Image: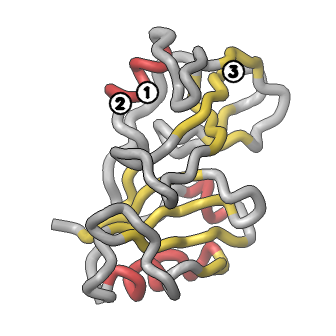
Amino acid sequence: MSAIQFHALSPSLVDAWRRGEMDANGLPPEMHHATSGDLPCRACLQPIQPGEDYLILAHRPFPTLHPYAELGPIFVHAGACAEWRPSEDPPAMFLAWEQLLLKGYDETDRIVYGTGQIVPTDAVKDAARAILDDARVRYVHVRSARNNCYMARIDRAL
């Protein structure tokens, strides 16, 4: 099976939103104040804690527009947060959830049919490796099993 790496959003992209650059809908990110600890930051891949400020914005994790280029809401800390380093292990916050949705994408950023699956979080590594063993698949998205929101990307380790 393939060696894998979980990737967060790039710090430069997140910093641009923190400076007020527009989101995928052409709107400025919305500032909010967390009242619970169940909001996942896509920059550090850790929960946003009660009392912390965060941004809500529309994100499309694809380089171009096309029919499969899904857009959805995400959360990021409003201020600097710990940078996620690519890792073969999933973020600890993923393991607190019951399930995740995985989808494989090809070199044209289209879904590879048959790769989408909802998996228990303790099986996400093995499921991602199996999807990436398909030669048609270039990368995998980790998404919320309940809301389909983008969480992270998984690539083959180099």
Residue 75, position as x, y percentages in the image = 63, 34
On-image quarter of the N terminus: bottom left
Q: Is residue 118 above or below residue 110?
A: below
Q: Between residue 77 and residue 107, name the one nearer to us.
A: 107
Q: Which residue is mark 1?
A: 14
For the point 69% across and 21% down, the residue is 52
Farthest residue to the front: give it. Answer: 67
User: What amino acid type is highlighted by mark number 1?
Assistant: Val
Residue at which label 3 appears: 52
Residue tagged by mark 2? 11
Residue at (50% x, 60% y) in the render:
68
The amino acid beneath tag 3 is Glu
Q: Residue at x 36, y 45 (%)?
A: 64
Q: Is residue 127 above or below residue 25?
A: below
Q: Secondary structure at mark 1?
A: helix
* Dot 2 crowding, Cα within 10 Å, few <14, some 14–19, many 20+: some
Q: CA distance from mark 1 to mark 2?
A: 5 Å
Q: Are marks 1 and 2 in contact (CB under 8 Å)?
A: yes
Mark 3, residues whose alpha carbon is within 10 Å: few (<14), some, or many (≥20)? some
Of callouts 2 and 3, which one flags the residue occurring earlier in the amino acid sequence?
2
Name the amino acid type tagged 2: Pro
Label 3's element? loop
Q: Are marks 2 and 3 in contact (CB under 8 Å)?
A: no
